[in-house]
Amino acid sequence: MSALPLGIDFGGTGIKGAPVDLDSGDFAVERVRIPTPRPATPDAVAAVFVELLAAFPEAGGPVGVTVPGIVRHGVVGSAANIDDSWVGVDADALFSEATSREVHVVNDADAAGLAEVRYGAAAGRRGLVILTTLGTGIGSAMVHDGVLVPNSELGHLLVGGAIGGAVAEERASNRARESEDLSMEEWAARLTDYYRHLERLFSPDLFLVGGGISKRSEEFLPLLEIDTEIIPATLRNKAGVVGAALHAVHAAG
Ligand code: BGC
């Protein structure tokens, strides 16, 4: 068994895992995807991790897992879009015990940010890079000179203007676009308000846009009226797995 780290991306519909080659930032072996159990309680999800680990004897290194919520020192602190039973759970301890391996959890957007700054769209960029993932919610990662400031949760900012004094992700996520049947122009107006607010607060050097909709970035990024450079993330659905593996190796020291 080699010491490759294993990255696991825990999402709403699927749990994806693969051993990661940290030199190339790519999967060392083809990934495996298992449907997310319902309800996706921590115990039910731990059972899926045991199954995933058995599929990858080559991944003997630390295991990283993304979680779509706040994660402080392995403890899950919020569950905006996942089962409420996650809040307060020491996920590092629970998953390490269930799998008999060293497991480290990390916020999903933070994992993607780490991966994009190391291998993707922001590789080699200095200054403040803010990744936002536009999906069911809005996830965020703030990376300054390659160092992550975790749990920024910029999707939960209250934003005014066209967004109307609401929680940003409730009005500007891709789910909001779909459920309110917004045109790209209408959605872009909300995104403009959102990114302008982030510009005022953080003066970033670069915005990255991730999430499945970033595949269609040419349909909405040119419509944004902001001053900061904004580009699509490039690692797509690999970012979570690769970033989780990076985090695990870092956390394992
Ligand atoms: C959660 C974040 C998460 C984002 C994307 C938000 O609702 O609060 O922690 O990164 O959704 O999944």
Image (cartoon, helix red, strand yellow):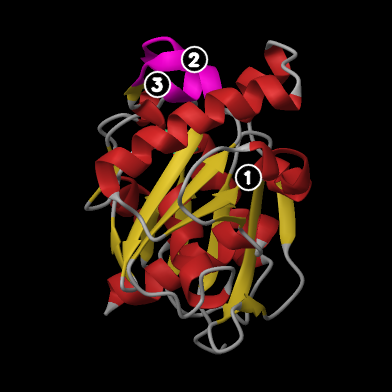
Cα–Cα gap, marks 3 and 1: 23 Å
Say if the magenta span includes residue 19: no
Q: Residue at x 42, y 45 (%)?
A: 140
- Asked if residue 113 lies left or right of residue 233, the reply is left
Q: Residue at x 36, y 39 (%)?
A: 198
Quadrant of residue 71 within the rendered picture: top left
For residue 105, above or below residue 247: above
Q: Secondary structure at mark 2?
A: helix
Where is residue 63 shown, x and y percent of the image? Answer: 46, 67
- On the rendered image, what quadrant is the C terminus found in? bottom left
Label 3 neighbour load within 10 Å: few <14, some 14-19, many 20+: few
Residue that carries the numbered disc 2 in the rendered image:
162
Label 1 neighbour load within 10 Å: few <14, some 14-19, many 20+: many
- Which of the two discs, 1 and 2, labels the residue nearer the N terminus? 2
- Asked if residue 134 lies left or right of residue 138, the reply is right
- On the rendered image, what quadrant is the N terminus found in? bottom right
Q: How many marks?
A: 3
Cα–Cα gap, marks 1 and 2: 22 Å
Residue that carries the numbered disc 3 in the rendered image:
84
Q: Which residues are magenta?
A: 159-172
Q: Secondary structure at mark 3?
A: helix
Where is residue 188 shown, x and y percent of the image? Answer: 63, 29
Asked if one can make out residue 247 in the rendered structure from this viewpoint, the answer is yes
> Which one is in front in this view, the residue at disc 3 or the one at disc 1?
1
Where is residue 117 shown, x and y percent of the image? Answer: 47, 70
Residue that carries the numbered disc 1 in the rendered image:
211
Disc 3 Cβ-to-ligand 1 distance below 8 Å = no
For residue 79, above or below residue 48: above
